[in-house]
Image (spheres, coloured by chain):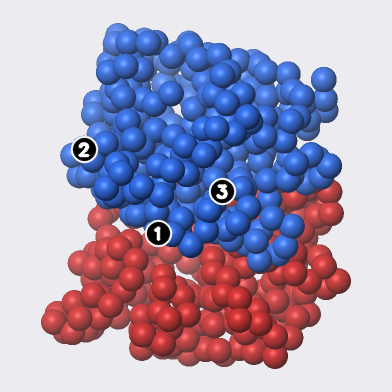
Chain colours: A blue, B red
Amino acid sequence: MSLKLYHAEPAANSLKSLLALKEKGLEFESIYVDLHKFEQHQPWFIAINPEGQVPVLDHEGAIITHTTVINEYLEDAFPDAPPLRPPDPLGKARMRYWNKFVDEHVMNYVSMWGWHRMVGVIARSIEGGEFERLVSRIPLYEQREKWRTARSGFSESDLANATRKIEVAVDKVENQLRSTPWIAGDMYTLADINFFSMCGMGVERMFPHIGNAQRCPRLLDWARRMRQRPGVIAALAMPDHTNPALRTFTGEAH
Amino acid sequence: MSLKLYHAEPAANSLKSLLALKEKGLEFESIYVDLHKFEQHQPWFIAINPEGQVPVLDHEGAIITHTTVINEYLEDAFPDAPPLRPPDPLGKARMRYWNKFVDEHVMNYVSMWGWHRMVGVIARSIEGGEFERLVSRIPLYEQREKWRTARSGFSESDLANATRKIEVAVDKVENQLRSTPWIAGDMYTLADINFFSMCGMGVERMFPHIGNAQRCPRLLDWARRMRQRPGVIAALAMPDHTNPALRTFTGEAH
C-alpha cells in the first residue's frame, strides 16, 4: 500500500491524522505504536522519525511528521479525495490561523492535564533507575523534561495557566461558532479536525466546569455534529489499548 | 492599492512579511505602526487586528494576521508572482515542517533575548502608573505578561533555556545546510525567510558565542546569500525608526 500511518490510540495527535485519512477515504496501512511500551523511543522507530513522536506518515517511502504538516500534505498529494481545506486563498488563511492557534495555544495545555492525570500515574509506577533509563532514550529535550515533570508533578501555577488557556480557547471557538457552522467558516476543514482531536472531543468529560452547556452550547453541538460524521466514527473505532482503569478515572474521553 | 501592510521596523515579524512581499515583487501600501508609541494597542489598530500585533495584511479589505499565515496567503493569492513555496506536495511539507519549527521553537526564544536587552530598557523607562495604564490596553494576556516581565526582568533560568533553544536551532539549520543549499531543500522558500527574520539575520551580532564561523559556517554563508538577494536588500531598506542608542548597545542586528 502506498500510504502507511504509524500511530497510537485514536486520541490527540494520532487521532488528528487518522481523522484526515478517514475523512478523505484514503486507504492506508495502520501500524500501531505502543506508547505504553515506549515503542516510539525504540531504535526501529527512531530510525523512521528521529524525534521519536507519533504519528508518522510514510508515503511511498517519503516520511512526513507533525500532524498539521501531515494533514496539509494529504490535501496537496490527493487533490481528488474529498477536500478538507477551502479552495480559496482567504479560506485557507482562516483555516491556517485556527490550526496555528490550536497548535500553539491549545494542544500543549490540554496535554498537560492529560499527562498530569494519566501519564503521571504511569511514570510514577516505574522504578527510579528504570525510569531514567527509559527517559534517556527520548530524543527531544522537551519530551524528556515532560516525562520527568509528569513523574514529579506539574506545578499548581502551570496547571492553573493551562486551565486558563483552555478556557480562552473554548470561549474563542464558542464565539466563532456564533457566526459560522464550522471553525474556519462555512466548510468543514482541518481546523475542525485539529480542535476536535486536541480539545473538543474530550472537553466535556475532562473539564466539565468549562465544557458545559451553559458556557459553550454551540461547541457541544459542533462536537455532536463531528461525532456523527462517518469519517469521525471510523477514526474513533480504531483499536484503543489504553489501560481501561486509567481511562476511567482520568476522565479521558472516548 | 489592493494590498496594504501594517508593519513596524524591518526586523522579526514585520521583516518576515516585508520579505515575502518584496521577493514576490508585489506592490503594496506600507503603513508604519510605531511600536515605540504603542500604536499597535491603540483603538484604531485594535479595530483592524483585535490581537494588537503587527504585521497585518489587508487585501482588498480582507484582514490576514500571523506572518506564517500571511506568507502562505501571498503564495495562494498571487500564483503568478515568483513562488516562495515548492510546487510539489513533499516540498511544501518540508517547508511547513521548518516554518513550524521556527514558529514554535525559535521565534519566542530569540524574542526573549531581544525583549530582555531592548524592550526591558523601554519598559523600565516608563513611570509605574503610566506603565500599567499602557499594559492594560494590550489585548493578549501573553503580551501583557511579556511586557510586565520585560520590566521586572526575565529569570536567569528562562534566559538560559532560551539560549539553549537558539543553540539547538542553529545546530539544526547548520546540519540541514550540509545537504541542501536552502533550509527546506533545493529551493529558496518561506522557511528561509522565516528563519532569517527570526534568528539568522541577527545571530552573529546578538549571540556571537553561537553564531560564529566555528559553530555554523554554512549558516553564515547562507545568511550572506540571503543578504545579496534584491528582495532582501529592498526589505531591509525599509524605514527603521529604532532608537539608535538602543540598537547599538543591545547588539540588535541590521
Residue at 47 percent across and 48 percent down: it is: A102
- Identify the mark at residue A191; answer none if there is no mark: 3
Report helix, strand or loop for mark 2. loop
Q: Which mark is residue B113?
A: none
Does residue B195 appear to the left or right of A158 in the view shown? right
On the same chain, marks 3 and 2? The answer is yes
- Mark carried by residue A155: 2
Residue indicated by mark 1: A175
- At a point 48% along the width and 62% down the height, the residue shown is A179
Which tag, 3 or 2, sits closer to the chain's start?
2
- Whole-percent x and y of residue A176? 45, 59
- The answer to whether any part of residue A5 appears in the image is yes
> Where residue B149 sits in the image (x, y, percent)?
25, 64
Asked if marks 1 and 3 touch (Cβ < 8 Å), the reply is no
Who is closer to the viewer here, A144 or B59? B59
Q: CA distance from mark 1 to mark 2?
A: 30 Å
Amino acid type at circle 2 is Ser
User: The N terminus of chain A appears in which quarter of the rendering?
Assistant: top right
| Mark earlier in primary sequence (1, 3) | 1
* Disc 3 secondary structure class: helix
Residue A239 sits in quarter: top right
Q: Label 1 is placed on what type of residue?
A: Asn
- As drawn, is A115 to the left or to the right of A198? left
Q: Of tags 1 and 3, which is closer to the observer? A: 1
Name the front one of labels 1 and 2.
1
Q: Tell which circle, 1 or 2, labels the residue nearer the N-terminal end.
A: 2
Q: Provide residue A115's location: percent of width, then percent of height.
A: 34, 28
Q: Relative to A18, is A8 above or below?
A: above
In the rendered image, which quarter is residue B226 located in? bottom right
The local crowd at label 3, few if under 14, some if 14 to 19, many if 20 or more residues have their Cα within 10 Å, is: many
Q: Which secondary structure, mark 1? A: helix
